[in-house]
């Protein structure tokens, strides 16, 4: 349980860091998503009747969808959490285990968005896609688990 909480917090920290710090490095990648599985970025949780609250911390709320398939491409995932910041859809966290699922998920992300930027200095396998929606793929051989995080970065209108 502690490892899962640590992985979630590490993923959130890395996703937030990339979102805040990469403004000068940002460029759009191919097929940047306007939504995740039909949930449009910055849409209100009040528009959703198919989600149940899992956890909340101040104005951050984690939801799951009732009939969400636990797959990503050909890979099997353990969980998919939808994060709402101040009632607006801002992030998705997908957790998985095994090298086999990592390879399938990485293949799907490369197929959809092109090759990500690989961080060769990380002790984990780490890929980034930067744009208005940042995507972070992480995998640890040591723990045999990983995650995909989509983080919406609102643009000024």
Image (cartoon, rainbow, N blue to C red):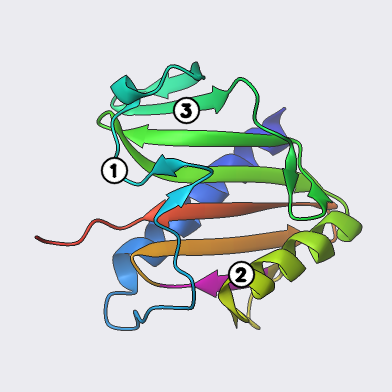
Q: Is the residue 90 above or below the residue 60 in the image?
A: below
- In the foreground, 112 or 126: 112
Magenta stretch: includes residue 77: no
Q: Earlier in the sequence, mark 2 or mark 1?
A: 1
**Residue at which label 1 appears:** 42
Q: Position of residue 80 (x, y in %)?
A: 62, 36
Q: Is residue 124 visible?
A: no
Q: Which residue is mark 3?
A: 62
| Mark 1 secondary-structure assignment | loop
Where's residue 41, x and y in %? 35, 47
* Place of residue 140 in the rendered image (x, y in percent of width and height, measured from the top left): 77, 59
Most frequent secondary structure within the magenta stretch: strand
Which residue is painted at 90% across and 59% down in the image? 100
Question: Which residue is depicted at the point 49% across and 54% down?
Answer: 150
Q: Earlier in the sequence, mark 3 or mark 2?
A: 3
Q: Crowding near pointer 1: few (<14 within 10 Å), some, many (20+)?
A: some
- Quadrant where the N terminus is found in the figure: top right
Image quadrant occupied by the C terminus: bottom left
Q: Secondary structure at mark 2?
A: helix
Picture quarter containing residue 67? top right
Q: CA distance from mark 2 to mark 1?
A: 22 Å
**Position of 11 compared to 108: left or right?**
left
* Mark toward the viewer: 2 or 1: 2
Comparing 41 with 63, the one in front is 41
User: Residue at position x 61%, y 20% from top?
Assistant: 66
What's the magenta region? 126-130
Please tell me which of labels 3 and 1 falls first in the chain: 1
Give the answer, above or below, for where 20 lies relative to 115.
Answer: above
Q: Which residue is mark 2?
A: 112
32 in relation to 7, above or below: below
116 horizontally vs 132: left or right? right
Quarter residue 28 falls in: bottom left
């Amino acid at each position: 349980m502690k490892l899962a909480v640590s992985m979630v917090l590490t993923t959130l920290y890395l996703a937030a860091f990339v979102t805040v710090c990469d403004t000068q490095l940002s460029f759009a990648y191919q097929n940047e998503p306007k939504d995740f599985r039909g949930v449009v970025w910055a849409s209100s949780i009040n528009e959703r009747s198919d989600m149940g609250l899992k956890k909340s911390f101040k104005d951050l709320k984690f939801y799951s969808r009732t009939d969400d398939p636990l797959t990503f491409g050909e890979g099997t995932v353990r969980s998919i959490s939808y994060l709402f910041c101040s009632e607006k859809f801002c992030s998705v966290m997908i957790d998985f285990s095994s090298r086999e699922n990592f390879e399938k998920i990485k293949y799907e992300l490369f197929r959809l968005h092109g090759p990500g930027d690989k961080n060769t200095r990380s002790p984990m396998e780490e890929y980034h896609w930067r744009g208005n929606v940042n995507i972070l793929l992480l995998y640890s051989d040591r723990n045999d688990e990983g995650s995909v995080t989509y983080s919406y970065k609102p643009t000024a209108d």
